[in-house]
Image (cartoon, rainbow, N blue to C red):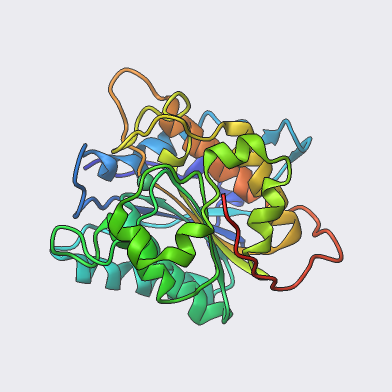
């Protein structure tokens, strides 16, 4: 397991000072329950490494967003058991959120999202979750564990019923039987392509405060080949960034994670995309809010 050698975006000291930073990047190099292709424990270091190449000036928004300050925290070391790992993640997340910083966690495997969402709900009260992913992750248990990355959104549903799942294209019959209402709410890549109002559909599932979790396999493997279970037919960079920009404009995004990157030898496409996406989230959450954003309206949608 590689650990980051320097801070996110290789910022000068004044831009990454802990006391002043509004954003905190937390590396979690954990892959305790990974089932297919290993290597996501190396992702936080690879993403931070790639982030040194991200331009501070955002080309889309014509602005530099570093002045808010971005501190890179020490990595959470992998624990012996998933239970202990979740405890460590929760306790660090609570402390960061209490300090008022925006916590941006870099995985590692997806299972860490459950304690992160719990910590966000403790801090902010009623919370919604936007998940970008190829997989529903709604199994109650997987290979004997309730903490598996394949169960993470089932654990999240125990915290909040307001969950929008976007990019989903691989799920089981068991998940359909056990979580029928949630399966009906999926926003699949096919819906993203065919429905010009797909972002409105996503917004209708979310309340005011939103936690964002991005499993990079939600993207098409052409954009992110380096991930544990690449799934054809995924989302594009423009679709995902358009979605995140509007969610950040019309809701209060309180924290986010980017998980499941697996660095591949000989190319850095996936970790660079993750680094770019992390800075996009930092940028979008600093944009002025659109007024008149609606309150909680939950609509059940069919494909
Ligand atoms: Mn996934």
Q: Where is residue 208 in the image (x, y as percent from the top left)?
A: 68, 70
Residue at the spot 48% in from the left edge and 34% down from the top edge: 234
Residue at the spot 19% in from the left edge and 46% down from the top edge: 35
Q: In this view, does 40 lie to the left or right of 259?
A: left
Q: Position of residue 283 (x, y in %)?
A: 67, 47
Inspect this view and state whether residue 153 appears: yes
Q: Where is residue 34 in the image (x, y as percent from the top left)?
A: 21, 48
Residue at the spot 34% in from the left edge and 40% down from the top edge: 43
| Residue farthest top in this picture | 266
Q: In which quarter of the image is residue 5?
A: top left
Q: Quadrant of the N terminus?
A: top left
Q: Which of 144 and 27 is in front in this view?
A: 144
Check the image and report above or below for 169 versus 255.
above
Q: Nearer the viewer, residue 207 or 102?
A: 207
Inspect this view and state whether residue 75 appears: no
Q: Quadrant of residue 180?
A: bottom left
* Image label count: 0
Q: In which quarter of the image is residue 6?
A: top left
Q: Position of residue 211 (x, y in %)?
A: 54, 63
Check the image and report above or below for 110 versus 156.
above
Residue at the spot 62% in from the left edge and 54% down from the top edge: 69
């Amino acid at each position: 397991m590689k650990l980051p050698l320097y801070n996110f975006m290789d910022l000068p000291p004044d831009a990454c000072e802990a006391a002043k930073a509004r954003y905190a990047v937390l590396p979690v190099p954990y892959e305790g329950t990974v089932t297919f292709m290993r290597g996501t424990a190396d992702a936080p270091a690879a993403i931070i490494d790639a982030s040194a190449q991200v331009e501070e000036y955002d080309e889309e928004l014509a602005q530099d967003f570093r002045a808010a300050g971005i501190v890179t925290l020490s990595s959470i070391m992998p624990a012996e058991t998933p239970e202990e790992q979740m405890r460590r993640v929760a306790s660090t997340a609570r402390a960061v959120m209490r300090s008022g910083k925006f916590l941006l966690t870099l995985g590692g495997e997806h299972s860490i999202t459950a304690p992160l969402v719990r910590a966000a709900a403790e801090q902010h009260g009623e919370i919604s979750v936007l998940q970008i992913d190829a997989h529903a992750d709604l199994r109650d248990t997987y290979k004997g564990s309730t903490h598996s990355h394949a169960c993470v959104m089932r654990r999240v549903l125990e915290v909040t019923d307001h969950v929008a799942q976007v990019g989903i294209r691989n799920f089981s019959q068991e998940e359909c039987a056990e979580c029928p209402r949630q399966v009906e709410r999926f926003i699949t890549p096919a819906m993203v392509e065919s429905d010009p109002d797909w972002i409105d559909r996503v917004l209708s599932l979310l309340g005011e405060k939103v936690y964002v979790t991005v499993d990079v396999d939600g993207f098409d493997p052409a954009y992110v080949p380096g991930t544990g279970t690449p799934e054809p037919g995924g989302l594009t960079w423009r679709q995902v960034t358009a979605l995140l920009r509007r969610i950040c404009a019309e809701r209060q995004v309180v924290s986010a994670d980017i998980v499941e990157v697996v660095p591949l030898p000989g190319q850095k496409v996936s970790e660079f995309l993750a680094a770019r996406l992390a800075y996009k989230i930092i940028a979008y959450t600093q944009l002025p809010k659109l007024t008149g954003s609606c309150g909680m309206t939950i609509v059940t949608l069919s494909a």
